[in-house]
Image: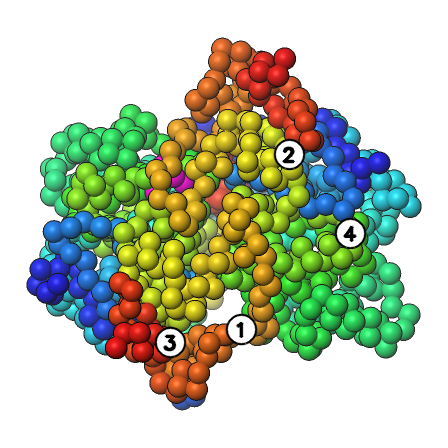
Amino acid sequence: MPLLQIEDLRAYYRTEVYGISRSVRAVDGVSMELYNNEIYGIAGESSCGKTTLIKVISGTLKPPLRVESGRVHYDFGAFEVDMLTIDPEELRQTVRWKEISYVMQGSMSVLNPVRKIIRTFEDIVRTHQGIPNKKLFLEQTQEHVRRLGLPPDVLNLYPHQLSGGMRQRVAIALATVFHPSLIIADEPTTALDVVVQRGVLQMLKDIQAESQNTVLLVTHDLAVHANVADRVGIMYAGRIVEEAPTQIIFNAPRHPYTEHLIRSLPTIGDKSVKASLGGAPPNLANPPSGCRFHPRCPLAMDRCRTETPEMITLSHHHRVACHLVTEAEA
Amino acid sequence: MSASGALLHVDHVTVSFHIGSFIAGGRLMAVNDVSFSLDADRPEIFAIAGESGSGKTTLARVLLHDLDPTQGKVLFEGRDLATIKSRRDAMEFMRKVQPVFQNPFETFSPLRRVEDYLFETAIQFGRAKNRRDAAPIVDEALRLVGLSLDEVRQRYPHELSGGQIQRVSVARALIPKPHLILADEPVSMVDASLRMAIVNLFKKLRDEQKVSVIYITHDLATAYYISDRIAIMLRGYVVESGPVEKVLDNPLHPYTQLLQESVPRPTASEREQWAKHIELGTMEVKEYGRIGCKYAGRCPHVMDVCKQTDPPDVEVEGRTVKCYLYLDDAR
Amino acid sequence: MLTVIRDLLKYDGRFRVAFVFLLLTLILAALSLFSPYAPNRTFLVPQDMPPSLQHPFGTNSRGQDLLWWMAFAVRNSLILGIITAIVSRIIAIFVGLVAGYRGGGIDRLLMSFNDSFVVLPVLPILILLSFLLQGQLSLVALALLLGLFGWPWDARLIRAQVLSLKERSFTRTAVYSGTPPLKLTLREHLPFVLPVVFATTINNMLWAIGMEVTLSVLGLSDVTVPTIGTTIFWANQHQALVAGVWWWLAAPIIVAVVLFLGLYLLFSSVNEFIDPRTRLRRIGA
């Protein structure tokens, strides 16, 4: 059984301001599975729906965001959870932090700026589990931090005393106190310098390798996925257009969008001219018909303008939604 | 290259800020003894690269005459920027040097139409008397960046994509027919699929419009792709500078080496190098206050002398390196 | 403009209430144009009549019909509020924009001037001035005087906004587009500052009308001019409450409450509407 099964998920933002109602179809028909013991990378440009997808699967969605249809089902081994129907109190007590935790961009929102790091640990452990023995809690926390390769002294510092990279690593330590089955990392290194980014991502990888759990890594930076993820899903305009093990995505992409992204990736040592793609990502309040990439696709056919391509499975867990590929494989 | 024949001549520029309280404060050297020149006859893309806190944005402000250097001077086409006082002189300077900013959604006021800025630029810099005369000039500039006036007419910033706005921003900068464009992280907030269009645009401007570009960035990959020369900054100093292929294919300064191998690569062969574990500091490092080489605290090749005095600029293998390691090679 | 009012009426309860209240006040003020009695004439109607069909607000001990008197009173109070608001807005916008955008020495000079006005005790000064003028302070002169005192807080508010706007990239874009400073601050900054200006306009009107009531109740303004304040002054002079002529006080108080509530609700509703963030949401950003 996969850890997480998502079936045909649709989640829209519906707003009404002075009588003008809008609905933004941020996630529009996503199906995917996450397995135990893997790092799954979601790549996509701004407003492709990746943040919305995270909100739904972590159970943190608030109005005006609403799930229209679909299924989000977790199997944590000991128990199963349907994210769309679970009682919020139960979600808070049994799932959040314990089974699903997250690391966000700029960890300052998790860390309380006026309290020492250890107090934030205390708050989280107390709300989710309780602290019957304070001395034991302190020892366990120090041990936890040390195992992740951080000096235990950081626990007695305030967030502003830490460097940006250390803050982000502390946030990862916080997210892993209960050894969750799934860690969702949403642009965890976006604001960081490359050297620091490297250190933080290395730590995330080490934790995953050791605890054999699942990491869902969301970032727009494909080069990061190339170095960290086991599998990568490419999102475009609210849908996953291609998904495959990292090697395959980078060496043999099939969707024209993926292909363009990978071919235009600048890299040190390569001065060859990189082509650019016309147009712009669509407005999800009014997405194009058929395949949503067709207005920008150099290979678009008539069919692409009217008919939404189905996701088909090629070899090696390689899935792609493109009429061209479907026709070539048939 | 003599100073008088240079488009831009940056001569030992230092910018220091007073930090802390009035009595117990210190000085923060945001830019420290930086020198370089751009040739007037040979347009080029010159990249200034560094991480946050390297001083690259402060240097950009000095080059835009937004901030006066504490020491040293900047000559643009032979004129010292410090002598620009009147509005007339400032207009003359801005006619030749134009900026492109980082965040496309902040570049233009969200409450105004983007075309207003283009018309304003054409009229204020004397290229047109009124909006009707300015229209063909604005259209021409927009066509250079792959847009047209009809596409942006009546549009507010939120109606355009980040990539489109950034191209409009470049078009606006082109209207006065500048000799130098200073682009501060112009693609860092633009989506991947739109990024190359802007990056390629700078190359086109250099080749076809003969405009020199100073490209300020933290992204070594795009810097490698478009620039001719690069200067790597660390805590106010330029630690290594020279032709971009030399500096990034074969970095000599230990800091440039770390930076270069920390850039994540999509190709399998280079992933192993990236995966080599690195140590990160716990606290916000006080490298600004360090005496001698700012990298000495992290450098694997550190020597005693590095912690005592600033390393000299050494000319080696066709580039300049601020490091004691290469002192012997240069002799 | 009409569609804006229509939208607000349709979607904002506060605006509906404000609209009704202010409409009532304006109708009352407009009635002054058709008054059968001049406001300075007395003993034209029977004295001390309670509210009735013939005299909806009753009549006072000076033989005046309170409905027509209040029509003049509310008109004059509104005029006073509007003059004060206009005068103080002009000063506040000018000082705030210039100090914020130019900065440096001009900023320090304007702000020290500004702060001197902030610390001036307005009420004692007005009492002193009115006392010296022996009730000769005309309504317009009082309005101008209040305008001169009513700007410094708002100028500070505007300056603070401009200071933060100045740091945003679009200001720099405008600078490098060659836009001259005054035009720049009017075009780039004023639209963001307008909600503050609007909010403070209504606040300022409320403050001015309230100030006039205070001075008039103390008998320090020109009491021959009907205003909300002078109505209360005359009622007190004739010991209306002791005499049981409660409607003489009820009329100005009810009118004042309706006017103040109307202005306040208008302020909060329109303020939200013209806030740049709401405006951006409305145009679909």
* Amino acid under disc 3: Leu
* Amino acid under disc 4: Gln
Q: Which chain carries label 1?
A: B
Work out which quarter of the rendered image holds the C terminus of chain A and state it. top right
Which quadrant would residue B63 be assigned to in this image? bottom left
- Residue at 57% x, 54% y is B272
Cβ atoms at labels 1 and 2 below 8 Å apart: no
Q: In this view, does B5 lie above or below A8?
A: below
The circle drawn on residue B325 is: 3
| Front residue of B127 and A6 | A6
Nearer mark to the viewer, of 2 and 3: 3
Residue topped by disc 1: B284
Magenta span contains residue B196? yes
How many angstroms separate mark 2 from mark 3 (CA)? 46 Å
Disc 2 packing (10 Å; few <14; some 14–19; many ≥20): many
Residue topped by disc 2: A244
Q: Give the range drawn in magenta.
A: B195-199
Cβ atoms at labels 1 and 4 below 8 Å apart: no
Looking at the magenta stretch, what is its main secondary structure?
helix
SS category of the residue bearing label 2:
strand
* Amino acid under disc 2: Ala
Q: Which chain carries label 4?
A: A
SS category of the residue bearing label 1:
loop
| Front residue of A87 and B296 | B296
How many angstroms separate mark 3 from mark 1 (CA)? 27 Å
Residue topped by disc 4: A212
Q: Hey, which residue is sitting farthest top in the picture?
A: A302
Nearer mark to the viewer, of 3 and 4: 3
Residue A323 as seen in the image, left or right of residue C220: right
